[in-house]
Amino acid sequence: MPDIEKIENLVIGSGGAGKLMAWTMGGAGRHVALVERGALGGACPNVACLPSKNFIYSAKVASLARRGAEFGLQTGPLKVDMKAVQHRKRLMVEGLHQMHVDRTLASRAELIMGAARFVAPRTVEIDLKAGGKRTIQGDRVFLDLGSRAAIPRIAGIEEVDPITHVGLLDLERLPDHLIALGGGYVGLELSQAMRRLGSKVTVIEAGPQLAAREDPDVTAILHDLFVEEGIEVLLGTRVSKVEGRSGNRVTVHINDSHGSRAIEGTDLLVATGRKANTEGIGLDVTGVQLDEHGFVKVNDRLETTSDNIWAMGDCAGSPQFTHVAEDDFRIVYGNLNGGNRNTRDRLIPFCMFTDPELARVGRNETEARRDRIDYRLVKMPMAAVLRTRTVSEPRGLMKMLIGKNSDEIIGFTAFGYEANEQAAAVQTAMVGGLPYTVLRDAIFPHPTMSEGLNVLLGGSVPPKGA
């Protein structure tokens, strides 16, 4: 084995958790090296969260432009320039990349660009991007390996060469007909955006509803929204095989309640889930075990099955959100410095950036019934919030679950304009252990979406025990 460099803290992967670990330790004067094989900062600022939201907002502007007459604007025919859409996104990504470079340099963490593979416990051999190799052993190792889009096992899928969110977010052309496999967050956000930019879109979902984990009343509104925008939605539909070449012509063979048929399109988007980037990096020599789905096994302190190795973010099976990865960092770093934090009972908010947005914190009705939790329900249409009238965005609903025999907030769901801001207010109350009455009686500015909580809770809550 070549000469082994020894270091106190070795971080593999610069995603949300990894970069924060390296920056924080480096800033505190600890000896730390950060290894990244792809783009500094991981997926979120480069090919996922932020680029997709940038892209989605361009689509929203296109949608608003088409509604110009509704707002008193006289416009001519609308033309979308996909190269300009991508240029705006890339400028943002370039700025984010430079921010990550600057933060890394300022932290004094050593940045090593290259692909790491374990050759012994806590020891990696790195194929450097600039050429050559280094072998480094860490006293402590932190895995932030991330995840990637999973390609489903469908006959012909490899030959078709479908795109994932990464490829779609880099297209400088507008697909004539995009067929999206998957009715989850990624598939729905990008399908709506592509439709608004001008593509014909078909969404194929194997389950009985879109956004499978959400309540039926919420997904019914979401389904109607998509149909009204001209998106073909096929539920309860299985794909038996695909043919052709994405970017040219694809044929998707499906089976549903009407039998078997084929759908013709030009591009195939796969958005059916994700898999951890744990293959081919030598974890088998470390004592780090994986679960049946390929994610790193961790306890509630994010410790792996090997001493002095931790896993954070997507690869650890954490909910696949940047804000969760960042909390993973806080747990691990806090415990290393005398804390006693864990992943149990974390209150994790969800937000899907369709337009309008779907936001949730805590349990929904489906989960409360599953967990046999009795609750009182308050629910109202989003149009009851006067702010929606000012922006002509009345679609949607909000609802809150309150303890049957207490004033505890069990969960909150909002589907509508700026729903994420409403959910943030409710989450703050839940984190503080506050009863729903605090939100009911709070003074929110008018006219805002937050004051909708006054309307939702003011006088409409069933009595305790009801």
Image (spheres, rainbow, N blue to C red):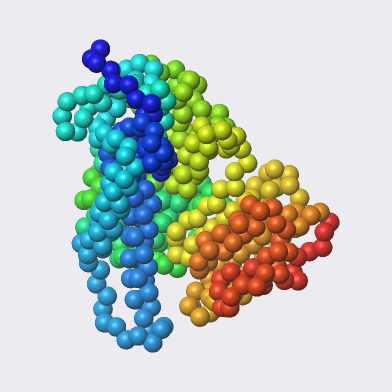
44 over 218 or under it: above or below: above
Q: For the point 31% across and 45% down, which residue is it? A: 106
Q: Is residue 262 left or right of residue 414?
A: left
281 over 458 or under it: above or below: above
- Where in the figure is residue 426, as x and y percent of width and height? 62, 59
Count the numbered circles shown. Answer: 0
Q: Is residue 27 visible?
A: yes
Residue most toward the front? 29
Instruction: Please state which of residues 98 and 189 is positioned toward the viewer in this rendering.
Output: 98
- Where in the figure is residue 445, as x and y percent of width and height? 59, 75
Q: For the point 52% across and 52% down, which residue is it? A: 350
51 over 155 or under it: above or below: below
Q: Is residue 413 visible?
A: no
Q: Is residue 253 left or right of residue 211?
A: left
Q: For the point 29% across and 43% down, which residue is it? A: 105
Instruction: Please state which of residues 276 and 208 is positioned toward the viewer in this rendering.
Output: 276
- Where in the figure is residue 9, as x and y percent of width and height? 39, 29
Q: For the point 76% across and 57% down, which residue is it? A: 407
Instruction: Please state which of residues 414 and 10 is positioned toward the viewer in this rendering.
Output: 10
Residue most toward the top? 1
Quadrant assignment, res 454 = bottom right
- Where in the figure is residue 229, as x and y percent of width and height? 41, 67
The quadrant of the rendering that contains the N terminus is: top left
Residue most toward the left? 131
Q: Is residue 279 left or right of residue 414?
A: left
The quadrant of the rendering that contains the C terminus is: bottom right
121 over 194 or under it: above or below: above
